[in-house]
């Protein structure tokens, strides 16, 4: 049970929690019954030694740790609930006292969701700029269509040159010793893309299919892997294939074969229309971003650092998950990009701070303006999630609490209300 609750600093509380001797004794007895079969005492068959005998042999506290672990989670959760705290990370808990006559006493340091204020978000002024669509943009988009319909032509009568795709084996050595992440087979590389460290691709140029050769390069001084930063290395290369991309001619025949249109002019008109729609959608997105940035500026409050760290963790995990679908693990990606996990985390830091602040601001705006989600809106959100993940609604409800869905709906309604009240001027 909760004994006391004391604020020790901004967004941090210390809870004193007690478990009565009776409740602790029950947990110890359950632990004894669960573990007695594993304990051997001379003169007793396995599993038959009395608890008193085991405690005499191994000490009175032999079952204490497991007993505390069995009641820890529920006990702390109930105390946090009784203290009416909303945590943003697991509490830091330590056992301060323990014994059969006193039970268990915990001290839990809890970092809580901050109390914030948000200024008036009605009538935010922003400018909407729709970038015009040029002929060059239309040609560029059609160029992508030609590339998608291009054919790859194998080359065996000339050496590799910039722009070619080559298929190579490479094996890297530093001071004659192979280094981690420096080997691959049948790797496809576009020469001139700058995908590899300076000097690598340039030394593939000029070689023919079947050639085996060495490449001497030096890693940049600021390369993230300390073992390789500034190091001179040798890559042993075998060139398997050289390919170049042959684009189809842009004419009416190409248009008829690849689209629902008859002429190049019809295709260009349709591409322009879609680019203009996209430009308007992009402008709308920019407007919403500007409005939300203004909302963030109106937020006041001290935000716990751990909230930013948690958001960065989510972003890194999501990125690693996306990589896994491409058959790449995060460690390999970082090695090839010359990054550390810390430098990757730093790239997400600014975005994470904005997302945390915006969410807090919108939640507070919803409270201040009495925005509430109806039961019907909550059910509709459950249905949408079920459709998105192809799961029955009842299954979704097992994973997401109604109160979390309710808050998401209220935040969404807050966004809609703030956008509707904004003053938008066209550039």
Image (spheres, helix red, strand yellow):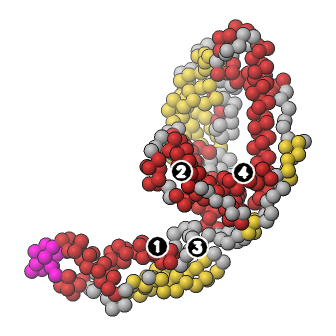
Alpha-carbon distance for marks 2 and 4?
19 Å
Mark 2 neighbour class, 10 Å CA radius: few under 14, some 14 to 19, many 20 or more: some
Q: In this figure, which residue is indicated by the disc labeled 3?
A: 111
Label 3 and label 2: CA atoms lie apart by: 32 Å
Q: Do the residues bearing badges 3 and 2 touch, measured as CB atoms within 8 Å?
A: no
Percent from the top left, x then y, of residue 199? Answer: 68, 37
Q: Which residues are magenta?
A: 39-50
Viewer-side label of 2, 4: 2
- Foreground mark, 4 or 1? 4
The numbered mark, 1 or 2, whose residue comes first in the sequence reads: 1
Residue 36 marker = none
Is 48 one of the magenta-colored residues? Answer: yes
- Would you name the residue on which mark 2 appears? 379
Split into 4 quadrants, where in the image is the N terminus? bottom left
Q: Secondary structure at mark 2?
A: helix
Q: Is residue 202 visible?
A: no
Between disc 3 and disc 4, the foreground one is 4
Does residue 122 appear anywhere in the picture?
yes
Against 322, residue 347 (above or below) is below
Q: Give the mark nearer the N terminus: 2 vs 4.
A: 2
Q: Are marks 2 and 4 in contact (CB under 8 Å)?
A: no
Residue 86, image quadrant = bottom right
Looking at the picture, how far across and down is residue 202, in whole percent?
A: 68, 31
Residue at 76% across, 48% down: 288
Q: Looking at the image, which is closer to me, 48 or 112? A: 112
Q: Secondary structure at mark 4?
A: helix
Q: Mark 1 or mark 3: which comes first in sequence?
A: 1
Q: Which residue is mark 4?
A: 416
Residue bearing the label numbered 1: 77
Mark 1 and mark 2: Cα distance apart in space? 28 Å
């Amino acid at each position: 049970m909760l004994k006391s609750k004391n604020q020790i600093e901004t967004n941090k509380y210390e809870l004193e929690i007690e478990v009565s001797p009776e409740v602790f004794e029950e947990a110890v007895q359950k632990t004894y019954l669960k573990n007695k079969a594993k304990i051997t005492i001379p003169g007793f068959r396995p599993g038959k030694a009395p608890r008193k005998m085991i405690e005499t042999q191994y000490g009175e506290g032999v079952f204490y740790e497991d007993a505390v672990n069995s009641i820890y989670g529920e006990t702390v959760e109930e105390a946090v609930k009784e203290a009416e705290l909303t945590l943003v990370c697991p509490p830091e808990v330590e056992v301060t006292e323990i014994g059969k006559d006193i039970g268990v006493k915990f001290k839990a340091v809890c970092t809580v969701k901050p109390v914030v204020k948000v200024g008036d978000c009605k009538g935010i002024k922003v400018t909407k700029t729709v970038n015009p669509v040029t002929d060059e943009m239309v040609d560029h988009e059609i160029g992508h269509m030609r590339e998608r319909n291009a054919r790859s032509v194998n080359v065996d009568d000339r050496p590799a040159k910039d722009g070619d795709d080559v298929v190579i084996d490479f094996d890297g050595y530093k001071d004659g010793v192979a280094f981690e992440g420096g080997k691959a087979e049948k790797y496809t590389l576009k020469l001139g893309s700058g995908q590899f460290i300076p000097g690598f691709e340039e030394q593939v140029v000029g070689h023919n299919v079947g050639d085996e050769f060495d490449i001497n390069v030096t890693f940049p001084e600021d390369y993230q892997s300390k073992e390789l930063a500034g190091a001179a290395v040798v890559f042993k290369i075998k060139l398997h294939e050289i390919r170049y991309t042959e684009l189809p001619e842009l004419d009416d025949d190409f248009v008829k074969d690849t689209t629902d249109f008859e002429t190049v002019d019809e295709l260009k008109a349709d591409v322009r229309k879609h680019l203009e729609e996209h430009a308007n959608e992009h402008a709308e997105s920019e407007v919403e971003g500007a409005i939300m940035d203004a909302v963030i500026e109106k937020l006041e409050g001290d935000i716990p650092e751990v909230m930013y760290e948690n958001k960065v963790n989510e972003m890194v995990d999501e990125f690693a998950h996306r990589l896994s679908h491409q058959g790449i693990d995060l460690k390999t990606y970082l090695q090839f990009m010359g990054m550390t996990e810390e430098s990757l985390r730093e790239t997400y830091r600014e975005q994470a701070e904005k997302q945390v602040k915006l969410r807090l601001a919108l939640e507070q705006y919803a409270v201040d303006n009495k925005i509430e989600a109806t039961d019907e809106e909550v059910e509709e959100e459950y249905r949408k999630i079920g459709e998105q993940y192809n799961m029955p609604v009842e299954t979704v409800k097992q994973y997401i609490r109604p109160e979390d869905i309710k808050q998401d709906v209220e935040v969404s309604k807050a966004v809609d209300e703030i956008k509707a009240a904004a003053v938008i001027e066209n550039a």
